[in-house]
Image: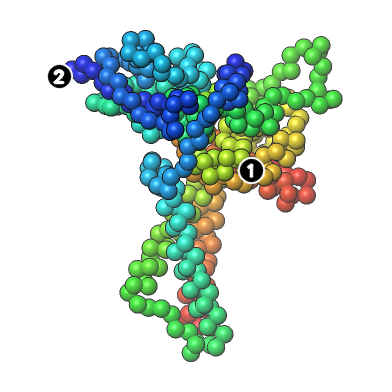
Amino acid sequence: MAVETIQLSITRYDPAVDQAPRQQTYEIPYQDDMVVLDALNWIKTHLDGSVNYRWSCRMGICGSCGMNVNGTPRLGCSVFLRDYLPGPVVVEPLPNFPVIRDLVIDMTSFMEKLASVKPWVISNDHAPALAAGEHRQTPAQVEQYRQFSMCINCMLCYAACPVIAIEPHFVGPAAIALARRYDLDSRDHAGEERLRTVTGSDAIWDCSFVGECSAVCPKGVDPAKAIQQTKFESTLGMLLPWGGFK
Amino acid sequence: MGRLQIAASDAHEGTRTYAPRLGGTWFLRSRGYIRYVLREFSAVPIAVWMLWFLVEIARLKDGPKGYHPHMSPAFVVFSIVCLAFALWHSYTFLSFSGLIMRIPIGDRFVPANFVRGGAYTLLLVVSVLIGWLLVWGGAR
């Protein structure tokens, strides 16, 4: 017998009224190709316009619609209702972040952590001037950092990391993976500057290698690997007289 | 992301947010967390076994007569469990060595499988060497 409806239990939190978040259940018509974000949009359009959540591209690129679906951090646009039949599908805000309203979390701390690792190319005086044209890289040079450059800042890794919950100041998986991405970029020359940030307090040495950050990443980035590589190379840098490998 | 950042900052300044707390049973939320907690706590019995081993070594200062190894079935079972945990730790540690250790050779890096294989070989060689020393020493 074909499924005709499915229930969604959505976290509701109105800071003006509620002391704590609560769950509210909605029943919606089921379609086989419906993702959780489609279901939320259907609820907002047809049942309850007051439900709040972030979304933008609907194709797993912008990283806006991160939410906890049946206890696992997922992108709402990339997770099908059919994987949770017969339901209900429990949709909650991303854990480890303050909740502003319903499924909307406060990402201020994440943005500050991200900026702290300076995730952009920083050239030195010896780099070719812009007027000289493109700063070309070989495929091998691109391959060094390509995987870490796939991060879309969706914060699912922060939601999956219990260290973030215990140590809220921990710089966290995505920021360290992005620091690694620029450290491995042949055009960048700020590796030592970033290393001071990621090897300082509340950074790589807080990570106890739970590994869930990599497990939940929707883009196949491996932040746990980035963190362990940074641990290894910073240690080697201290031990080897010539300062380790770049 | 820039637009989202502004929206979040505005909301944060103007409204009260709810800060969730990590409950005592957080590790039951996923199989990955359970595996992690088991892995971390499995170090405790290994540490206990190692302490006992140090006590036995200290007793050797009085010669063979002072050495009284714990031979009860319960301790043998405990030792086997500790060995299994130690092998698990070795496996999790060494299986990642290929991904974590990037050793450059010119423009390339030593392949991950080679680093991993080398780590396992080294473990095997050292284990056999220590085993041989124990057997050889015990036979003298």
| Three-letter amino acid code at the position of disc 2 | Met
Where does the image place residue A241, in percent across and percent down from the top left? 78, 49
The residue wearing badge 1 is: A202
- How many marks on residues? 2
Q: Give the vertical position of A119 relative to A233 (above or below).
A: above
Residue displayed at 33% across by 10% down: A46
In terms of image quadrants, where is residue A2?
A: top left
Q: How far across and down, in percent of the image, does residue B124 sit?
A: 50, 58
Residue at the far front: name it: A17
Q: Residue at x 75, y 25 (%)?
A: A122
**Mark 1 and mark 2: Cα distance apart in space:** 53 Å
Image quadrant in which the C terminus of chain A is located: top right
Dot 1 or dot 2: first in sequence order is 2
Is A141 in front, or is B15? B15
Task: Specify the label residue A1 is tagged with.
Answer: 2
- B18 or B65, which lies in front? B18
Q: Residues within 10 Å of mark 2 (few under 14, many from 20)?
A: few
Residue type, numbered disc 1: Asp
